[in-house]
Image (spheres, rainbow, N blue to C red):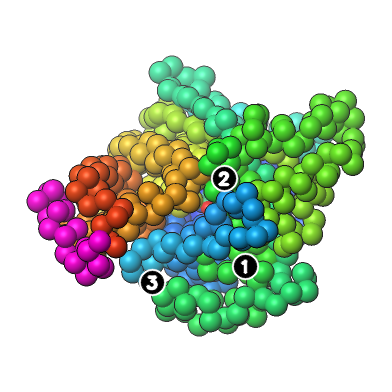
Amino acid sequence: MPKHVLIVGAGLVGSLAAVYFARRGWRVSVYERRPDPRAKGYIGGRSINLALSVRGLWGLAGVDLDRAVLERDAIPMPGRMIHPAPSADAAATPVGTIFQPYSKNPADAINSVSRGGLNLTLIHAAAAAPGVELVFDRRCLDVDLDRCRASFVDDTRPGDPPTIIEADLIFAGDGAFSAVRTAMQRTDRFEYSQSYLEHGYKELHIPSAAELGIAGVGAGTWAGHGGAKSVAGGARGSARDAASFALDPNALHIWPRGGGGSMMIALPNRDGSFTCTLFWPFAGDHSFAQLEGELAARKRIDPHAAPSGEEQSGVLAHFRQHYPDAVPLMPTLVQDFFANPTSSLVTVRCAPWYRLARDGKRATVLAGDAAHAIVPFYGQGMNAGFEDVRVLAECLDRATGAAGSGDLAAALAEYHTLRKPNADAIADMAIENFTEMRDKVGSPAFRYRKRIEQAIHDAFPDRVAPQYNLVSFSTVPYAEARRRGRELDAVLDRVIERLGPDSPARLGDDRWKQEIAVAAAPLLS
Ligand SMILES: Cc1cc2nc3c(=O)[nH]c(=O)nc-3n(C[C@H](O)[C@H](O)[C@H](O)COP(=O)(O)OP(=O)(O)OC[C@H]3O[C@@H](n4cnc5c(N)ncnc54)[C@H](O)[C@@H]3O)c2cc1C
């Protein structure tokens, strides 16, 4: 009899896990609270996108889905495009954008993918795999961890009794507010913490150049950033070229507005549009509360309350002042601002990520956001979740393979030992990267620091890799990436002490690079 896994949640991680288990001969049941996106379209916004990088691709490659996702869904972004804050006399002296490559290797790019498109690809792959049953409109209410069984309700049929499903393994892919994890939280010695940023997020929209009636950014642009097209492959290039973009599509756009602790980012979609995300404080200067005015309070009384004319013109004036280059590209800015929700950003940590049933042979296990929700500033939540799935599958393979004991407990213990320290490390790095994106990327001191980092990386490519590269363009464990990132930071501090920001002009580029290498060499371990 094949083993039976019950996967709770057909999101990104749950649907990928279904493919992995099916390929290993398990009988797979996936229960998802939302309607079937194959029939009803993806519910979760019109074009919300995510950055997919090497770890996520490694997770997809374990079931041969990486190339299909890249070809169908992705736009490569080899760097950040900074939109500096306008000067006081912005109209007189508009500030230009600055492109910062993520890596000295022009083939290194993170990829903008549509969340809905990727989820659909994974659900189709799960549905096509043998032995997979997908059940939608079923919300997990609770899990009996001792008996390894879960109860589900169909919210479209109120009054129906809950369905109980029993399995050899329950896999929690039900996200940051996991019902499965909630059941674990009631058990003895389960550690749990959640913390919220004082910043929230709201999504806005930039339509394609064609919709805006303006000249789009041409196909040559991304080769202009160093030829990342070679990574993309022909299919990605031609699909992208068919759409016309209002901004350079081959960059993650950032409008850092450090003074108020705020920023806006924009990622391209394959239809030529961009999804913008505001990361602003909930309260204070440059905040959601400041611009939403009294509307939030009025909406608590009347959910249909509309913004006043004053509130609408306040939003427009604010964007004209702080994001002047984006305003002409956002014809629905004011409507979107008031219609789209303001959501919070949570970090969840917990341990252990598994619990054995009373018989010691069956178990419940957490993965993805259910195990480790992190803030999105390193673009790694989904990537880490895909890595979880492949590592878990490999642990199960080792335990059940020729030399393995067939011991589920041993496999889950190994999975937890391998993943937990790395999840903690990326949670910390994601918060640190928030400060970097928000406060530092626009500053000359930061740009000089990045230039030195790059020069050291160029001089000692086998000994040094910047933390961003290790996180986004390698599968070096996150904890190791963080340790090496800190070591390199200490080296940068010492080199900058010797060769300050005036040194490139003073020495000339070649000599400056030599001096950087001389200063760094004895500091590298
Ligand atoms: C603004 C923002 C930007 C982000 N950007 C990036 C990025 O660029 N790169 C990146 O790698 N990550 C990014 N992330 C993180 C990424 O979205 C998550 O890490 C990823 O979605 C986690 O996948 P998951 O499958 O674990 O959870 P989810 O995607 O949340 O899926 C959970 C699924 O479980 C279902 N579910 C929930 N409760 C129940 C229940 N009780 N019963 C049945 N089903 C249930 C849900 O409907 C959903 O389908 C971002 C997150 C945010 C908020």
Per the rendering, the mark at residue 107 is: 3
Secondary structure under tag 1 reads loop
Q: Which residues are magenta?
A: 506-525
> Please, is residue 246 above or below residue 5 in the view?
below
Query: Which residue position holds label 2?
Result: 257
Q: Residue at x 83, y 45 (%)?
A: 313
Indicate the amino acid at tag 2.
Answer: Arg
> Please, is residue 83 above or below residue 145 in the view?
below
Real-space Cα separation, disc 2 to disc 1, in angstroms: 19 Å
Q: Would residue 400 appear left or right of 83 to someone viewing this image?
A: left
Can you give x and y, in whole percent of width and height, for residue 308 in the image?
89, 38
Q: Residue at x 36, y 63 (%)?
A: 103
Indicate the amino acid at tag 3.
Answer: Ala
The residue lying toward the viewer, choosing from 352 and 282, is 282
Q: Would residue 463 appear left or right of 229 to someone viewing this image?
A: left
Per the rendering, the mark at residue 247 is: 1
